[in-house]
Image (cartoon, rainbow, N blue to C red):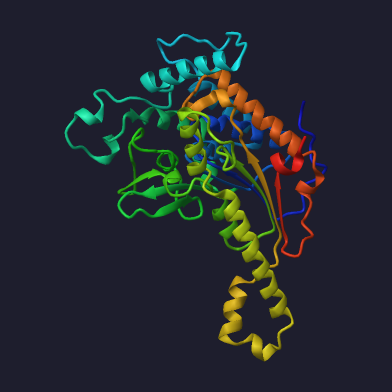
Amino acid sequence: MTAKPAPARPDFERIALLLQGGGALGAYQAGVYQAMAEANLHPDCVAGISIGAINSAIIAGNPVEQRVDRLRRFWETVSSPPLGVPDVSSLKLNDNFQHQTVNQWRALGTLLWGAPSFFQPRIPPPIFTPAATPDRLGFYDTKPLKSLLESLVDFDRINAKEAHFGVGAVNIKTGNFIYFENQTHKIAAEHIMASGSLPPGFPAIEVDGEYYWDGGIVSNTPLQWALDSRPRKDTLAFQVDLWSARGELPRDMIEVDVRQKDIRYSSRTRKGTDEFRRMQSMRRAAAKLLDGMHPELRQTPEAELLAQEADSKVYNIVHLIYHARRYEGSSKDYEFSRRTMEEHWQSGYSDMERTLRHPEVLARPQSADGVFTFDLKTQGRQ
């Protein structure tokens, strides 16, 4: 099935696509974007963390008609079996146990041999070597990723600012979270790699004399970046999460590990949305007060301070959250098999296609706070 094209661009000043980090789960985001593209929903604001940064760069760094193809090339490349690992993607799997066994075998292959054109084991491992610079302190070498990114991403297009673009990383020395934006930085492959350098697996990346790690260490969700950006605009935001904050009670130690990773990397997205909604109610109230305020009072420092925060814009925040199957286990973020990649991609495509069946998703909100949120899992119920 093909996602039905929107009759016209939705009545928003900005369409934002915001992509969470999550390793191999990132193929879900590629499927979401394919459905968006088929529905003629082309974002003019794109941001990501970790694997979300890579997907974001491929989307923002290509013309509309090439984006899905470039995403497909990336995911087919990194999901190819490493040399020496048999391709088991065509095996017929009859139950969850068989599926789990095959997934774990493929994840072991990733641990031992890495992912083609993405990362490879560092030999000897840094734990057995003397002190080194941060860019060598990782169990895997990510240098192959630089060449792959440069072959798939037109960084001149990103830096031409056709779309607002940002990726999050953490400065190792200061511990400060930073967004590398095309409004303030000349974006290159190093900025994307820095956003995805999760220790201890991946080494730090040097950018302008400073070393950076994966932004997911501090915050794995770029939603707040888009909502806080100035000037404020009527925004239709698609927040694509790879980790679900809500889940079932674990039944064994493997599921304990899965659950804690989901909670940690979900970055409390719903709490952030609820807090934004509360603040937006206050901003809209301030805007109404200022509109009816006497001109003399309007010139006071207190009124000017209110004016800086007042906001009458509207926001649709559409959540798409990947819900892993139980057989995926705790290795789901580094299980790069072709079979699983296709499963993730199709899940993202299907979820977005079903989300777009709900017309309220693309309509301007009418609530008093000017904020509408939608989650297919809780509101779509299809």
Image position, residue 232 (x, y; %): 63, 62
Residue furthest out toward the bottom: 296
Q: Is residue 7 left or right of residue 323?
A: right
Examine the rendering and report whether any part of residue 301 can be seen.
yes
Q: Is residue 36 left or right of residue 227?
A: right
For the point 62% across and 87% down, the residue is: 299
For the point 70% across and 63% down, the residue is: 313
Residue 244 occupies quadrant: top right
Image position, residue 324 (x, y; %): 59, 30
Image position, residue 128 (x, y; %): 20, 28
Question: Which one is in front, 35 or 348?
Answer: 348
Residue furthest out toward the front: 251
For the point 50% across and 50% down, the residue is: 182
Residue 69 occupies quadrant: top right
Q: Quadrant of the N terminus?
A: top right
For the point 57% across and 26% down, the residue is: 326
Q: Is residue 307 above or below residue 46?
A: below
Image position, residue 139 (x, y; %): 31, 29
- Count of marks overlaid on the render: 0
Q: Is residue 125 above or below residue 90?
A: below
Q: Quadrant of the C terminus?
A: top right
Examine the rendering and report whether any part of residue 164 can be seen.
no
